Image (cartoon, helix red, strand yellow):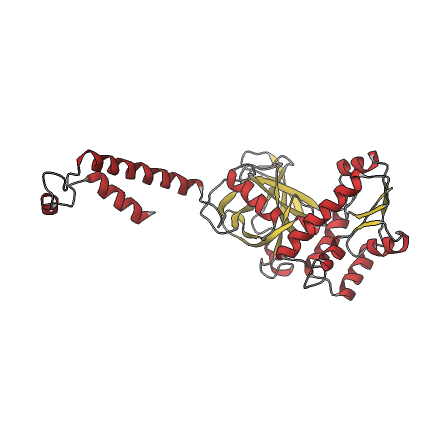
Amino acid sequence: MIHIITGPPCGGKSTYIGKHAKRGDLIVDYDELAMTLGCAEKWNPVGIVQRATQKARAAAIKAATNNPKAESWIIQSRLSEELRKEYESLGAEIVEIDPGKETCIERAKRDGRPKNIFLAIEGWYAGKKGGSMKTKEFNVQYKDEGTGSIEGYASTWIRKADSWGDVVAKGAFTKTLKERWNGGKGIPFIWSHQIDNLDSFIGTAEADEDEKGLHFVATFDDTEQAQKVRQLYKDGRLRKFSFAYDVKEAGVVTLDDNSKANELRELDLYEISAVTVPANDDAGVVDVKSGRRNSKADEDKLKEAIKLIQEVLGEIEEGDPEGGEDDPEGNAGAKDRKGSNPKKEALLDFIKNI
């Protein structure tokens, strides 16, 4: 039988498995896998160890689901309804371990867990049914130049209610950026608000408020998931951002068109996410930097350069105006090289400006 052990970070999932699993059972525990594969800092695998751990975990889960009658124990912090139904269809037992938020935080402090674990604990409880954490999404616009980061707006001050009837007041993030995020540094950049799933952390963002809204620059981690998300933005297949928050202060406001909206005046920011579902069409990507492939703009430039090169080479094959059979020494062209071949000069100027 497959046993799915779910619950918040530091909830005691590994301890539960240790008490109930038998020798020879398959145990899928991300933290234990990471340590086995050489994690230098406990609970915080990075680089090749992180990538190897993620692949090993996925392979182990596949082995378990392919043989559901074998005894397997899988730690899964949070279950989506879809995943829950999938496991239940295999006859899996689902056990939730929930000792309470304060207990989890105390355990994290005692064990010296990294900062993102505390955020994941908050996220697990805030995202639980009846929790207070909310999310808000924004469409994006695409621009690419190149180096492994993404720049955009997670929220704007536009005075037009979104699909939830909200507008965000200018300065709504001032306090949370200062107090929670040390002036806007070290904000988690996550895939689809899976704040309690450490595999979903795809980078780190720095944010500030400007005249348009909550501006941020996020650096992608060097992981398979992070780079896949970066490529999806680069290709235009992802075009949205979102942020997770709690409302600290809000009130009804009348907009310029005399319509009413709920104005969010002070927000507690948890994270910024790459998402697929929009709520507001105004915020977006300013820049996606890859550091791995040429951008669409670069590709267009290269195509133009190739076209110019082909045209110049074509003229040379037909007979170089600066030399050739009638002028074996090339002296005729030497008298007036500049401007003698406008396509060549255009090509040289173009190359200088690439």
| Above or below: residue 116 compared with residue 353 | below
Viewer-side residue, 217 vs 126: 217
* Residue occupying the point 10% across, 41% down: 327
The reply, left or right, for residue 170 in relation to residue 297 is right
Q: Position of residue 152 (x, y in %)?
A: 52, 47
* Residue occupying the point 74% across, 65% down: 112
- Can residue 269 be seen from the camera position used here? no
* Residue occupying the point 62% across, 34% down: 163
The reply, left or right, for residue 14 in relation to residue 37 is right
How many marks are shown on the rendered structure? 0
- Can residue 22 be seen from the camera position used here? yes
The reply, left or right, for residue 199 in relation to residue 97 is left
The reply, left or right, for residue 318 in relation to residue 94 is left
| Above or below: residue 30 compared with residue 3 | below
Q: Position of residue 207 (x, y in %)?
A: 56, 54
| Image quadrant containing the N terminus | top right
Viewer-side residue, 79 vs 59: 59
Q: Position of residue 67 (x, y in %)?
A: 81, 39
Q: Position of residue 120 (x, y in %)?
A: 72, 53
Viewer-side residue, 302 vs 85: 302
* Residue occupying the point 12% across, 38% down: 325
